[in-house]
Image (cartoon, rainbow, N blue to C red):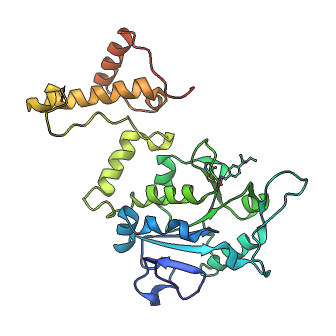
Amino acid sequence: MSVARASRPHEAAVGFPMPQQARRPRYGSRMTFDVITIFPDFFRSMLEYGLLKRAVACGQAGIRFHDLRDFTEDRHRTVDDRPFGGGPGMVFKPDPVFKAVAALDAGMPGQRLPVILLSPQGRLFTQAVAEELRHQDRLVLICGRYEGVDERIAEHLATDEISIGDYVLSGGELPAALIMESVVRLLPGVLGNEESASQDSFTTRQAGARESRHGLLDCPHYTRPAEFQGWRVPEVLISGNHEEIRRWRRQRALEKTWRRRPDLLAGFPLSEEDRQWLDILQREACEPVLQNDE
Ligand code: 9D3
């Protein structure tokens, strides 16, 4: 299945059921993403399934892809070149990227278009950044490749630079997809349930979003059967005692967070009851078990 074609051939667009809306800044959707990439086809499958498909279908998100090579002017559609000063690999040339953004900017007189460069040098993407980005009605995402992009793109074109974590990928496509997924699910109406604005503000309050914390790790979940290969579901969950269940879940969440991600507890608002439980854990001299070398 292919995505719908926009009037301009370099744009593979989805989410714009009414072509006459194509020149309005918001395109009839709450948030529009413009992704600049040399691999527009990379994104195809993720728009055919699940959350992003639903967000586009219900008009909460519009996602357009722009092939960087369409903004080159040479016969070979060259997007990269060798680095000044020597060294391995290739670097994205500035000109096609500036031209691609200029083509998008043309439709937005007066306003500064938010332009995010995905790069390993960017600020770390967290739930707090997702919460920040959801308030934009338009985002341009530039996917780098090769060894990097000409620094003038970061310095004079991008308004923001984001990394998704400290591991090496071969380009910004996966990070762009990840960012769209996490931002779109925060848009009201996308999750289907009434889990929208109110649930989000709960999450924000609970998580202290300003500190880039996203809350506690989740407690364990179980479903039927009550016994599977000899392993029984914790009795308390079958007891029907809702106050006991609530306390058990809170304690398991605190315990798992304390053992695996103690860094999350630092920015988290703890109740008196929480503190008492953490004190007990500490007194039992359970050493935190770190997953990484923190
Ligand atoms: C010469 C050193 N380079 C390779 C080890 C640096 C480098 C350049 C470009 C490493 C990766 C990339 C391509 N990655 C991205 O464009 C990227 C990325 C990532 O690799 N990790 C986490 N987040 C991101 S956002 C974009």
Q: How many marks?
A: 0
Q: Residue at x 30, y 33 (%)?
A: 219
Q: Residue at x 58, y 86 (%)?
A: 8
Whether residue 198 is visible to the viewer of this picture, yes or no, is yes
Q: Viewer-proximal residue, 190 or 271?
A: 190
Using the image, determine if residue 267 lies above or below residue 176: above
How far across and how far down the image is residue 38, in percent?
Answer: 64, 69
Q: Residue furthest right?
A: 85
- In this view of the protein, which residue sits in the foreground, 25 or 294? 294
Quadrant where the C terminus sits is: top right
Task: Locate residue 167, reporting x and y percent.
Answer: 61, 43
Left or right placement of residue 60 versus residue 120 in this view: left
Q: Nearer the viewer, residue 70 or 104?
A: 70
- Outermost residue to the left: 240
Residue drawn at 50 percent across, 42 percent down: 212
Quarter of the picture containing the N terminus is bottom left
Q: Is residue 97 above or below residue 276?
A: below
Q: Quadrant of residue 197?
A: bottom left
Q: Position of residue 287 (x, y in %)?
A: 44, 14
Q: Can residue 102 be spotted in the picture?
A: no
> Residue 50, image x and y in percent?
35, 63
Q: Is residue 218 left or right of residue 7?
A: left
Q: Is residue 154 above or below residue 237?
A: below
